[in-house]
Amino acid sequence: MAKDYIQRMLGENERILLITRQHWFVLFSAILAEITITLLLIAAFSVATIYYPLAAIGFVLVFLPLISMLRDILIWTNHEYLVTNRRVIQISGIFNKNVVDSSLEKVNDVKMTQSFFGRLFDYGDVEILTASEIGVNLFKRIGNPVKFKTAMLNAKEKLGYEGTGTHAQRTDSIPAMIAKLDELRKQGIVTDAEFQAKKKELLSKM
């Protein structure tokens, strides 16, 4: 059902390049307390039923943390991050879906942050700076962040050449990108130093 929902969102000739979720650490940290409570309840009522058989009724309480754990698993499972050949999509929600997407054409910069443990267990934060009204789109503690960033940048690079196969179209878009960056600078979203650095990088590609 989830796959059908994703497929219905795709445009003509749009294809999925990568799908990832938040790292399993996020899920584990969410359900650890519920697992602990479940085990403690089972142990407590198992001992209690030895002396008081009617205490077996208390096993009904075990369903409460189990239901909460199932909810957390469904939330984690249904929170997905996609890279297509045209955009980056974030989908969340079990029944009511919340979809946020950023066109690759409007992605100006990408920042990835990984801690020591993030590099060890392959998770991290990916921050996308866009020229859209969203401004900054932050994906926290996602799995395979390097692969996610690489897929996105490769798709953006290819998008600049699709349809014409010429360098001229890409070169013509650079002044527009600089203008958008300047607007973000004026709005205080990027600093003067970041603007100058990115401007220098873009001009070097002309």
Image (spheres, rainbow, N blue to C red):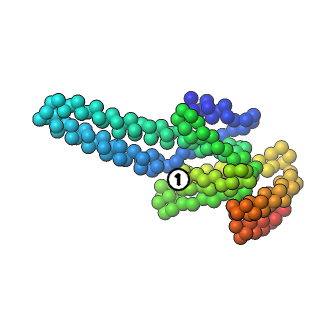
Kindly give the residue lying farthest to the bottom in the view shown: 193
Image position, residue 192 (x, y; %): 73, 69
Residue 187 lies, with reference to residue 49, above or below; the image says below
The kind of residue on which mark 1 rests is Arg
Residue displayed at 63% across by 34% down: 6
The quadrant of the image that shows the C terminus is bottom right
Secondary structure found at label 1: strand
Answer above or below: position of 117 versus 142. below
x then y, percent, for residue 64: 34, 36
**Nearest to the observer: residue 181 or residue 10:** 181
Could one spot residue 170 in this view of the protein? Answer: yes
Q: Which residue in the protein does label 1 denote? A: 141
Residue most toward the left? 51
Left or right for 143, reference 41? right
User: Dividing the picture into quarters, in which one does residue 183 lie?
Assistant: bottom right
Q: Position of residue 3 (x, y in %)?
A: 59, 32
Residue 139 left/right relative to 71: right
Along the horizontal axis of the image, is 80 left or right of 187?
Answer: left
Q: Residue visible at 54% across and 42% down?
A: 79
Q: Position of residue 44 (x, y in %)?
A: 21, 41
**Residue at x 66% of width, y 55% of height:** 136
Q: Is residue 167 visible?
A: no
The foreground one among 97 and 83 is 97
Q: Quadrant of the N terminus?
A: top right
Residue at image coords 56%, 45%: 20
Q: Hey, which residue is sitting farthest front in the picture? A: 187
